[in-house]
Amino acid sequence: MKWKRLFGAANKAQLFRHVTALWLLVKDPRAPLAPKVVAVLVLAYALSPIDLIPDFIPVLGLLDDLILIPLGVALAVRLVPGPLWLEYLERADAFKGRLPKWVAGAVLVFFVWAAAGGGLAWWFLAGPGSA
């Protein structure tokens, strides 16, 4: 029974609603710090073009998205006070399936991956003996 409750947000419409509510949580100054940190990590993973396990690997590639994102959402929901989370869900319903403006988040994810790629390229090009 616990697993069914834990993965209840796995249905696509509910997951979209919960991820939108996480986005609202991150922007709200009333939200506690711990759920904000979890929400930022979940949103960064959801927006990231690079997965923990690449999608081209059969079954496992999609399984990480089906497990990690709902688990992150469930953890954030558990950390947020109940009435505040209900408010976020109500506000998320107002988007009616349209994505809110996530430009800042997308730009942040892009720059993090660009910095990581640049650092990796520098490390390979500089070589271990040239430092």
Image (cartoon, helix red, strand yellow):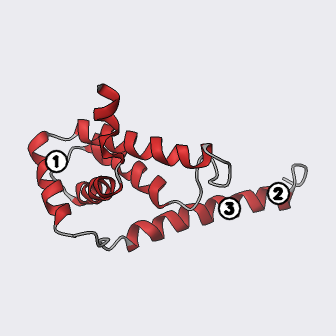
Q: Is residue 43 above or below residue 104?
A: above
* Residue 14 vs residue 125, the one in the foreground: 14
The structure residue drawn at horizontal position 50% and vertical position 63%, both measured from the top left corner, is 109
The structure residue drawn at horizontal position 28% and vertical position 34%, both measured from the top left corner, is 5
* Amino acid type for the residue under numbered disc 3: Gly
Locate residue 79 relative to residue 71 in the image: left or right. left
Secondary structure found at label 3: helix
Categorize mark 3 by other alpha carbons within 10 Å: few (<14), some (14-19), many (20+).
Answer: few
Q: Which residue is mark 2?
A: 124
Q: Which residue is mark 1?
A: 85
Q: Which mark is residue 126?
A: none
Give the number of marks. Answer: 3
Where, quadrant-wise, is the N terminus in this rendering? Answer: top left
Q: CA distance from mark 2 to mark 3?
A: 11 Å
* Amino acid type for the residue under numbered disc 2: Phe
Q: Which residue is mark 3?
A: 117
Q: Is residue 119 above or below residue 61?
A: below
**Residue 104 position within the rendered picture, expressed as x and y whole percent measured from the top left:** 39, 70
The structure residue drawn at horizontal position 30% and vertical position 48%, both measured from the top left corner, is 36
Does label 2 or label 1 sit earlier along the sequence? Answer: 1
Does label 1 or label 3 sit earlier along the sequence? Answer: 1
Q: CA distance from mark 1 to mark 3?
A: 36 Å
**Residue 80 position within the rendered picture, expressed as x and y whole percent measured from the top left:** 20, 41
Q: Is residue 4 above or below residue 23?
A: above
**Residue 61 position within the rendered picture, expressed as x and y whole percent measured from the top left:** 61, 48
- Where residue 55 sits, quadrant-wise, is bottom right
